[in-house]
Image: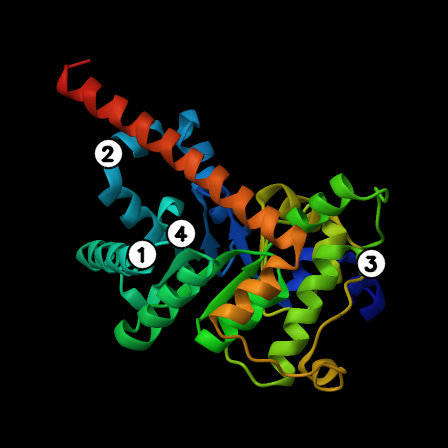
Amino acid sequence: MSSGSPDKRRKMESALNQLKKHTVVVADTGDFNAIDEYKPQDATTNPSLILAAAKMPAYQQLVDQAIKYAFNLLSQETQSCVGSHLCHRLSFDKDEMVAKALKLIALYEEAGISKERVLIKLSSTWEGIQAGKELEEKHGVHCNMTLLFSFAQAVACAEAKVTLISPFVGRILDWYKENTDRKSYEPHEDPGVVSVTKIYNYYKKFGYSTVVMGASFRNTGEVKALAGCDLLTISPGLLAELSQDHSAVTEMLSVEKAKACDLEKVHLDEKTFRWEHNEDRMGVEKLSDGIRKFAADAVKLETMIKEKILSVKNGQ
């Protein structure tokens, strides 16, 4: 007996499964259980997500068993890449970022995880972008440029030939809602969606190899409005919503559409980058705010780990 018409079966398919036909879905979480539930291809984290996961009762044993066990568990739970943040307190020190990244790669390799499976996450400051360029060119280390808000940042990352960028869709929306009179947007008008669409189109039109991974979503409308983007890293909460959503998902971004866009190629040296980025008030404020907040959460995580180490030493 037939299980139903093709149209009916299509309507029953979740938005998440439809999205996966157009875009590589990545889990934006430090929660291994969520990674296992939604079976994303890759996983990304940041200091805030790791801090939140480290506070969960389910992961206290994992924290207590230290970093090596965590590396092994990450290796088992994802099929492809794992993203690792460098401390954001290094965001303006290129040489120190390169040195710390190489030390982290060495730790991964000691744990049996090839550098090919690791993306080192760096802040998209000028120094961070140049660190990414050096890591890619001289050491074959793949980099994910995060805290990306302005078009100038995106152009500089493309010219540095980094592996991947993570433009923050939701945080861009947050800024516009906080700093303008407009408080709501349709998905296609969402400032974060508009920003990522422009970046994607620019990269594809001019043949840049850097991958675009939309990040920091506030709602499923933003996610679906970027269907077709190379990758989208999505929180467990929104993955759950998408898995229960059976509305149609249409490919919104494509190489063919990008090639037809009316965009001009630009070049940014350091002086031009700093000026163009400075002209984007939203980009300047969100980059600095993101660095401060990630650095603060990293300190909290370090403090929590130090307290646990002291407890072990004291026999508690």
- Mark toward the start of the polypeptide (4 vs 3): 4
Query: On the image, numbered disc 2 is attached to which residue?
Result: 65
**Distance between mark 4 and mark 3 Cα atoms:** 31 Å
**Distance between mark 3 and mark 2 Cα atoms:** 46 Å
**Residue 207 seen in this snapshot:** yes
Q: Is residue 257 left or right of residue 84?
A: right
Q: Which quadrant of the figure has residue 229?
A: bottom right
**Distance between mark 1 and mark 2 Cα atoms:** 27 Å
Residue 310, horizontal then vertical, whole percent? 19, 20
- Mark toward the start of the polypeptide (2 vs 4): 2
Q: Which quadrant of the figure has residue 128?
A: bottom left
Query: On the image, numbered disc 4 is attached to which residue?
Result: 91
- Looking at the image, residue 185 lies above or below residue 11: above
- Mark toward the start of the polypeptide (1 vs 4): 4
Pointer 3 and pointer 2: residues touching (CB < 8 Å)?
A: no
Nearest to viewer (mark 1 / mark 3): 1
Pointer 1 and pointer 4: residues touching (CB < 8 Å)?
A: yes
Binning the other alpha carbons within 10 Å of mark 4 as few (below 14), some (14 to 19) or many (20 upward) gives many
Question: Label 3 amino acid?
Answer: Glu
**Distance between mark 2 and mark 4 Cα atoms:** 29 Å
Binning the other alpha carbons within 10 Å of mark 3 as few (below 14), some (14 to 19) or many (20 upward) gives few
Question: Label 1 amino acid?
Answer: Met
Query: On the image, numbered disc 3 is attached to which residue?
Result: 189
Going 52% across and 52% down the picture, which residue do you hit?
A: 27
**Distance between mark 1 and mark 4 Cα atoms:** 7 Å
Quarter of the image with the N terminus in it: bottom right
Residue 97: which disc? Answer: 1
- Looking at the image, residue 251 lies above or below residue 315: below
Callout 1: SS: helix
- Looking at the image, residue 314 lies above or below residue 218: above
Nearest to viewer (mark 4 / mark 3): 4
